[in-house]
Image: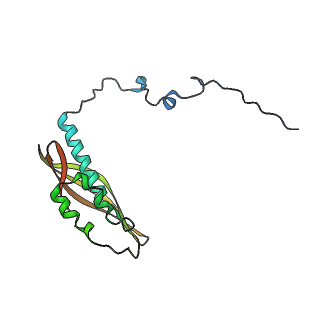
Amino acid sequence: MTEATTNTPVAVDSTNFVPQIAAPNVINTDMMATGVTVKKTTTLEAEQNAVKQLARVFAERYNTYSSDNIYNNIKDVEGIVTVGLWKIISVPLNRVSKPAVAFTGSIARVISMDISEWKPDQATVALKLTIDEDKSGTVTTKQREFGVMLLKANDTWLVDKYTWIK
């Protein structure tokens, strides 16, 4: 003989859920440290952070590539580089490429970044990258240092130059 199951409605209230999980945007002030002052970000700090993030985006996108998507890494940075840099890095887009015989790919990830030079209209960001390179299934990992020089024109920051430091 089988027993019939019934679906009895269960009320959801504070007895059967954790409020922080159900409402993640609710801040439990009981767990906050007392006497801690949160420093407000200045306009300069916000701008410098934006410049570092732009350098990061450029470094990761430009240095990540795949033989399956030839030159997508170059196309991905077109909107964040100066006209002068675009003229230099876009040269391979005009070449006819043969399909790769074996897969080659690279994934770049920024692991640290610091502003090494700052002026109101130009900046240099030093980045450390971890690069995983796949050549026909053999993956190697290396760390490299990469410098990104940015210029500000009409309130817009753009990548103007880059260099491998080591």
Query: Does residue 117 appear left or right of residue 55 in this picture?
Result: left
The total number of labels drawn is 0
Q: Is residue 99 left or right of residue 82?
A: right
Dividing the picture into quadrants, the one containing residue 18 is: top right
Residue 73, percent from left and from top? 31, 60
Q: Nearer the viewer, residue 166 or 94?
A: 94
Residue 19: horizontal and vertical position, in percent? 51, 27
Position of residue 127 relative to residue 8, above or below, is below
Name the residue located 18 percent from the left edge and 59 percent from the top edge: 85
Identify the image quadrant of the C terminus: bottom left
Q: Is 154 left, or right, of 108 in this rendering?
A: left
Residue at the image position 72 percent from the left and 30 percent from the top: 7
For the question of whether residue 35 can be seen, the reply is yes
Q: Judge from the rendering whether residue 26 lies leftward or rightward of residue 141; answer left or right.
A: right
Q: Quadrant of the N terminus?
A: top right
Residue 166 visible = no
